[in-house]
Structure formats: structure tokens, C-alpha cells
Amino acid sequence: MTKIQLTVDGASVSDDVEPRMLLVQYLREKLGKTGTVIGCDTSNCGACTVHLDGTSVKSCNVLAVQADGRTVTTIEGLADTAEGELHPVQESFRECHGLQCGFCTPGMIMQAVDLLGENPNPTEEEVRLGMEGNLCRCTGYHNIVKSVLHAAEGAKA
Amino acid sequence: MIPVQFDYLAPTSVEEALAALGQHGDDAKILAGGQSLLPVLRMRLNAPEVVIDLGGISSLRGIRDDGDALVIGAMTTHHDVRDDSLVKEHALLLSKAAAEVADSQIRHRGTFGGALAHADPAGDLGAPALALGAQFVIAGPGGSRTVDAADFFVDLFETAIGDDEILTEVRIPKHTGWGAHYEKFVRVAHQWPIVAVAATVRGSIDEARVGLTNMGSTPLRATATEQALAGASATEDGVREASQLAAEGTNPPSDLNGAADYRQHLARVLTGRAVLKAAGA
């Protein structure tokens, strides 16, 4: 077992974990943060995307021990949900109907937030390329792209 | 899918990492960014007893100017290679190729040195490194040695790095002002290329370097094409003959994505595109 200490969604946490434990397992099974989901388990689909020190990563492809001393933000920590608030990108996905079954949505939103942080005013093509590591099996992506572009518009207003 | 249990070591210096490697030998595996290693561990295609994580060695990260070369730390991420202003100025081809590695999330974690040491023939960085004449600095128990790109890639997933050695940095001879393009042909987004071509040219066209991805068990240089491009005009007609030579001496795999002769056809077509885009045509 290896001792790790990190910040997850604003809270400091510390645990003894097996080195082989994946970050996504740690978030879901140890911390109960099941908002982050496991889609493909092969690092293809991006459903497990979280932010590690502010940049998007696939949490099925990071060991929990590699997050020691770092800061993780999951879909559950994006907005102050206790106050009933949504992050502007979450709001935009709701407004533009950027989901059907919703399974890919946590990862989509976390990647969209990263993308807009790096490029606040993307073209449609830049959104499609920037989201290439996230797979959706329902929507055909059109409303997801619309949601990201809408969020960018909203941030300008 | 959960990896087999292993012990985890997180050295904070290259010396410590080498000592750990010396102690555990064949039972140990080096963890760089983990974007290739973790899938392998999860699928249990490999089950090392010890994983040595280089993530805590800050001296292995970063890019510096060293006179006639850039020096890229092995643990520098693809994201940072893509965006680095020195790389854009002196080795634009690497910036273009790094931008095409997998997807955004993978580029945030995956490392330049890790990808090159992994030596997947379908990896995106071997061909540009070879085309630019990269030199690989490898640390071992007896000190450091430097290996030319032509000798670094040995075979499928096999490099000149010994069992007791670690790739620490890669020297890239400056190609200041050279145009560049990485033309990648994929079946679906964010996947490995079926074939890709890395091209960088001086002028239009005084001199050219062309590397091929996934056209053999290692990255390859299209030397006949390079020679034919010297003095060619940067037009479709001007590069046609040189592009036709791109598959010479290649031995591409046949798999579900395409037969070997299909890949050779792709190499010729993509070389034409890559060279023209590199020349700004």
C-alpha cells in the first residue's frame, strides 16, 4: 500500500491505496464520486475525463498514486451543486440538448471546459478536433458541438 | 480491467531511478506518462513486479536551446512539445507531429521520451525524430551515451536503450525556418495512423527530409524521395516523381486496416501531400 494525499473537488483527502489502483477507481470506489464514469476501460472513450492540476486527463489511464500531491477536479466539483448551480458548460449542454443517454456527458463536459480554457473562442472544426478523445454513441455529436460553441458564446456575453 | 499487483517506486533523481532499475532489472518497468504502459498493464499483456515512475524527476521535463540543437527532456508532454515556441521556431515538424498524437487528454499525460522509448512503429514521433536527425541521450550505470536516430530504433517496440538504462533527453538539430507537415491517415479520429508521413523542407524546395510512420518495424527515412526533392519545384507536378519513390525499401505490415501494397500506395500519395503542405504550396 502507498499513502497518497491529494485535493479532490476542493477537499483534501488522504488514503492508503494499492499502487495498481486507477485514479477513476479511487474516485468512484474510495471517494464515492460516481459522477465520473468508466466507459470503455481502454483509454479510448473519454467518459472518465477529469482535470489533474487543471488539465484534462483520462482517469482510467492514470494511477491513483500518480495523483499524489496534486489537485483533481471531477464533474461533481465543477459547480456548487449544493446551491443548485450549474457550471456554464453544464448549463449549455442542458440548453442545447447536448446529450441523449448522458453516459458520455461528464467526460464531454470536463473536456469542453479544458478546451474552452485553452481556446475561449473556437471554430466548429476546433471543437470537433478538441473533443476527438471523447466518444458518444447517441447524438452524432452535433448537439454536443453546438453546446460547446454556445458556452463559448455565453462566456463572451 | 485492473493491473496485476506491483510495487511502486517514485525516485526523484535519475541516479535514484537507475539504482532502482539496477536492483530490480527485468522485473521492473519504467513509467513515463503511462499512456501506453497503463493500457498494457490493464490488459495484463505485461505484469512487472516493480513500476518505477519518472514523474517526480523534474530535471527530465522541459525544452532548452543548446546552440545548434534543441534539447527536449524525455518527460516533456506532447502538449508542451506542440506549444513550445522554441520547437515551433527550430523544429516545426515536431510541433506538427505532437499535435497529431492521440487526443487532447492523452497529450496532456503522454511524454516525448516515453513514446520514443516505447517505439511503436505506428507512433507519431519516431518518423519526425528520424527525419530531423535526432540524437538520443541515454543514461546508464556507467554514465551517459548518445545514440543517433538511425541506430536508436532497432525493431518493433525495441530500441537501443539497455535494460539498465533510461532515456533522459533528445537532441534535435535545429531546422530553423524549415516548413513542415505531418500527414496522418487514420481510420477513425485519435487513433494510430495506418500510414503517416513527416516532411520538412528548406525553401521551396532546396532540401527535404521525409520520415515514414508504420511502413516497417521501425520508423523509416524516405531517402530516395529526399534526394529527388532537392531542387524540385513545390507543385503537384514538381513533387510527383519524388513521391513515387517514397515506398522504396519499405516493408509495411498487412493487417485489418490495410494490406502492405495499400500502405505503399498510401505512402506515395501522403508523401506528395505532406511535402507540398510543408513547402506552403
Image (cartoon, coloured by chain):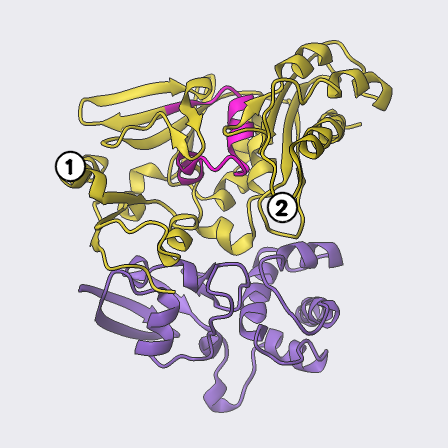
Which residue was labeled with disc 1? B19
Q: Which mark is residue A65?
A: none
The residues tagged by marks 2 and 1 sit, at their Cα atoms, a distance apart of: 43 Å
Span shown in magenta: B113-136
Residue A52 visible: no
Q: Position of residue B129 (x, y in %)?
A: 51, 27
Q: Position of residue B88 (x, y in %)?
A: 58, 33
Asked which quadrant contains residue B260, the reply is top right
- Does A74 lie within the magenta span? no
Above or below, B47 relative to A77 = above
- Residue occupying the point 73% across, 26% down: B268
Residue A16 visible: yes
> SS of the residue at dot 1?
helix
Q: Which mark is residue B256?
A: 2
Q: Position of residue B58 (x, y in %)?
A: 30, 42
Query: Mark 1: few, some, or many residues within 10 Å (few <14, many ≥20)?
Result: some
